[in-house]
Image (cartoon, coloured by chain):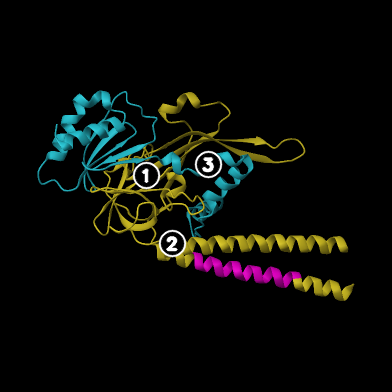
Amino acid sequence: MSLLDDKIDLFLTQAALADRKANYLPMLAAFFGEPGSEAPHVIYKRSVLYFFHGAKLMQTHPIVAARSTDATVYTFDGERIGRIQPAYYLGTATAGGKGAGSAGAASGSASSSFLLFDDGGSSNNNNNNNGNNNNG
Amino acid sequence: MWFVALVVTIGAFFLISRSLRKLGRLRRTNATMLETPELSAQSPVGSMVKTAGRITHPATTTPYGKRSASYWDAEVCAVFQTKKKKPAKGIETHRVLLDRMSSEDLPLIITSTAGDAVHLCFQGPRATMKHLNTNQDDHASLPEALRDKAKPKYESYSLRERYYPPGEKVTVLGKLADRNAGCMTLTDPDDAAVGALVTPVALDVLVARNARAMVHARILIGVYVAAAVAFWMIYGVAG
């Protein structure tokens, strides 16, 4: 087993795909071993494997019967394995321990504290439309 | 008369404090947008960064409008009217959310102007994605897939879709969560008060809009204070 194969093995284990190694190890090894490909990397999200060259999506591979409820996203570039857990960053999940009142206040401010002022929007257009309808 | 003075004072305090809070939020938002450093090869993992780029993920189609989109979300609501409960009079309109879909399960990739692949992985895309194209239609019947959710009392159904067209140029603010040779991943920041942002509007336009809103808020505070002072002077003279 080469070093790359070891790392692919580790990636598949991390992403809870250890029982499908027979299928995916050769596929990933071929993808990363391809000469001349620029910045190859893989993203595993919601039980689908996405193969990228840089920002360009090369192919996708849905993995049937894998756990699609898992929100964790894994990234792999042949060297490093990234594990991104979006739920960890969710305000309500972390504020839950501080009591219901403060948690509610925290999540309320989370959505509202980033304030963007909009002048002119779709709501104005809707009002105009309503006016036109009434006149007609 | 004392009672009126008390009510006016409390009202003025309430209005002034609300304007001050809004002013503070606008100032913080502008500071975040201006001071967050640009994403670079040296940006430390875990820090807030901003970057601009073009969405390069292949286009998908919105479920109802069949528009080509790089990101979309859709809501189906049932709309019906009832008479208000007894003491009140008139008609009120109810909206019941029947279904919500989005393309957030797909990874969203942008190519930054520097040429890097940036992977956006936000927990709440609905709150994060701003200034999407919106397209709303009212229908008499539900789409085929949702027919079993229909009820006789529902009068109409509104389908609302929001989307970014393919290749949309966006500005992104978020936390650099991970970096490897292939791409960088941005997520929501740990500090929920800061928030992440994806918008096709240039940041300097947003900053200018917020600056204008800050001027309005300051004028409003001035008016409230002047009105409160004027009231007290008149009341003081009269009393």
Question: On the picture, is A35 further left or further right than A69?
Answer: left
- At label 1, the amino acid type is Cys
Q: Which mark is residue A92?
A: 3
Q: Name the residue tied to disc 2.
A: B33
Q: Quadrant of the N terminus of chain B?
A: bottom right
Residue A25 position by quadrant: top left
Chain that is coloured yellow in the picture: B
Which region is colored magenta? Answer: B210-228
Residue at 34 percent across and 61 percent down: it is B38
**Circle 1 sits on which residue?**
B121
> Marks 3 and 2, how far apart in space?
24 Å
**Which hue belongs to chain A?**
cyan
Res A136 seen here: no
Residue at 76% over, 72% down: B229
Would you say the residues marked 3 and 1 are in contact, meaning their CB atoms lie under 8 Å apart?
A: no
Tag 2, which secondary structure?
Answer: helix
Q: Residue furthest right?
A: B239
Give, as a three-letter code, the residue at label 2. Met
Q: Name the residue nearer the viewer: B232 or B47.
A: B47
Q: How many marks?
A: 3
Q: Is residue A110 left or right of residue B171?
A: right
Front label number (3 vs 1): 3
Question: How much space separates mark 2 and mark 1, taking CA atoms?
Answer: 19 Å
Q: Residue farthest to the left? A: A35
